[in-house]
Amino acid sequence: MDQVWANRAVSAEAAVAGRHLKRLWALPGTQLGVVAWPPTRRDRWFGGWHYWWQAHLLDCLVDAQLRDPQPERRTRIRRQIRSHRLRNNGSWTNSYYDDMAWLALAIERASRVADVDRHRALNKLMDEFVKAWVPEDGGGIPWRKQDQFFNAPANGPAGIFLARYGDRLRRAQQMADWIDATLIDPQTHLVFDGIKAGSLIRAQYTYCQGVVLGLETELAARTGDERHAPRVHRLVAAVDQHMAPSGVLQGAGGGDGGLFAGITARYLALVATALPGESAEDAAARETAGDLVLSSAQAAWDNRQTVEGLPLFGPFWDRPAELPTALGKQAEFVEGAVTASEVAERDLSVQLSGWMLMEAAYAVSAAAGDDSNERTIDE
């Protein structure tokens, strides 16, 4: 079965590459993702800048390189990293800690999987997260600089990065403990979005669950501390019960929301393939996480459109995808977030989520077919 998912991941990669990957400002040796298809002229010339979408494009390229190492893709990975910095005004950083965490995670994986040395970028980003930790203000690290909103989408991915890079396991554990003490719904056991001026922001998004699953799984594997695995068990069960109708992860539309379910699938796959332990609870969490990924991926594939032989995914994997046009309302940056296009399938975020899901399904199925039964946290 893993070959089926490998083929589907190949098709998803080819679809994004063919429709979205373009040279930045026609400069040789560059590449970024055009944020919409079909694109406007402004889209083709990268007039808008969606920092964290590009970080997830890089992460998907690393997924593909892990699945099927190719010199040509390694070149694409290097170009994506170089072009990200160029389009970001020659800087790795911006004002949003969640954005920077996504880029840090993707570059760190690229350094291991594709042998891309960007240690100065990683050290710069690590420094941002370490210095942003402000327990005296109620955090956590904030969502963005000069802000008092402390949320899971910043602390989760930053914590995963610190667990993986720079010998910062203790700080990663502090971040996980802060989330567990502050943002867990006592009724559903899902993760709330964040806390602002001491008040809970009670929204519950799929990707908040995903990043906390990723953080706790990393810490369970890397520290052996017994407090992390039970949090994974509890949260996997909560996602299964509350966020996956009929076993399919719920969507969140286009714009930034287009990435939410794909991120959740990425870290459910990490639970399925890397959560340590031989207890019945460990096995149940791995099995449930893997089942959620595979059933979501099957639904997304069944509901895709096909354009010139390649898939186009919808924002809601349990519904048929719609073919987009360049007409109508387009995604735009408003108050720190990117809104959805009128037809969400037009947004790069939605297509990246579908690709991410296909790579997650391949990872789960390939691990299930591995006779070694040996789990490792490092790709």
Image (cartoon, rainbow, N blue to C red):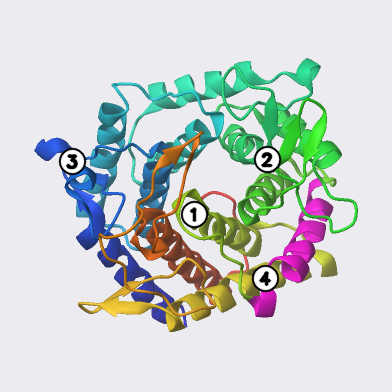
Which amino acid lies under the numbered mark 2 shown in the image of this protein? Ala
**Nearer-the-camera pick, 116 or 291:** 291
- Using the rendered view, name the quadrant where residue 174 is placed: top right
- How far apart marks 4 and 1 lie (CA) works out to 16 Å
Which amino acid lies under the numbered mark 1 shown in the image of this protein? Leu
Mark count = 4
Does residue 357 lie above or below 245 as drawn? above
Q: Give the range drawn in magenta.
A: 228-247
* Mark before the other along the chain sequence, 3 or 1: 3
Residue plotted at (39% across, 56% down): 341
The answer to whether mark 2 and mark 1 are in CB contact below 8 A is no
* Mark before the other along the chain sequence, 3 or 4: 3
**Nearer-the-camera pick, 168 or 310:** 310
Q: Which-is-in-front pick, marks 2 and 3?
A: 3
The answer to whether mark 4 and mark 2 are in CB contact below 8 A is no
Q: Position of residue 305 (x, y in %)?
A: 34, 78
Which amino acid lies under the numbered mark 3 shown in the image of this protein? Trp
- How far apart marks 3 and 1 lie (CA) works out to 22 Å
Residue beneath disc 3 = 45
Residue beneath disc 2 = 152
Query: Mark 3, residues whose alpha carbon is within 10 Å: few (<14), some, or many (≥20)?
Result: some
Does 238 lie within the magenta span?
yes
Residue beneath disc 1 = 259
Residue beneath disc 4 = 244
Q: Position of residue 196 (x, y in %)?
A: 74, 29
Does residue 334 lie above or below 299 as drawn? above
